[in-house]
Image (cartoon, rainbow, N blue to C red):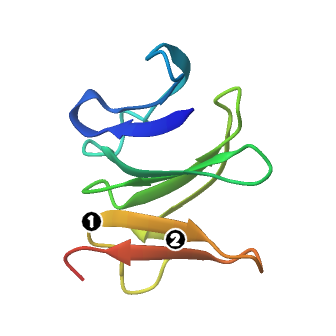
């Protein structure tokens, strides 16, 4: 299986080795530029998604239910500026990298 963030389609898809779509999640309509750039499958089966110019990181369950999100509105100083990289550490912390920061 291959997890693919399809930026301008605003969707993350998981493909089988035969190229069939096994799972997909459409990113939120708001913020306007919530384009998925990074998608990481977590050990519990959830998916962590960094949405570039939307300055948004979300975690979704396999059924597409959003379980966690962070935006600049949640953080002092609005440090996210193009959330192009995300990673969940073993201790549970989430690292967000910002291309323009």
Q: Secondary structure at mark 2?
A: helix
Mark 1: give few (<14), some (14-19) or many (20+) Cα within 10 Å. Answer: many
Residue farthest front in this picture: 17
Which residue is at 27% across, 39% downward? 7
Residue 55: x and y, percent? Answer: 34, 61
Residue 90: x and y, percent? Answer: 75, 76
Front position in the image: 3 or 94? 3
Which residue is at 43% across, 35% downward? 27
Front position in the image: 67 or 20? 20
Name the residue that disc number 1 marks: 82
Which residue is at 27% across, 27% downward? 9
Q: Earlier in the sequence, mark 1 or mark 2?
A: 2
Name the residue that disc number 2 marks: 74
Residue 77: x and y, percent? Answer: 37, 86
Q: Is residue 36 above or below residue 84?
A: above
In the rendered structure, the answer to whether residue 62 lies left or right of residue 32 reads right
């Amino acid at each position: 299986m291959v997890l693919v963030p399809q930026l301008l389609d605003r969707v993350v898809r998981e493909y089988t080795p035969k190229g069939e779509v096994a799972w997909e999640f459409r990113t939120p309509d708001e913020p306007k530029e919530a384009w998925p750039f990074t998608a990481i499958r977590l050990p519990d089966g959830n998916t962590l998604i960094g949405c570039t110019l939307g300055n948004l990181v979300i975690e979704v369950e396999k059924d597409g239910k959003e379980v966690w999100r962070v935006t600049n509105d949640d953080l002092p100083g609005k440090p996210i500026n193009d959330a192009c990289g995300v990673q969940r550490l073993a201790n549970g912390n989430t690292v967000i990298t910002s291309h323009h920061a």
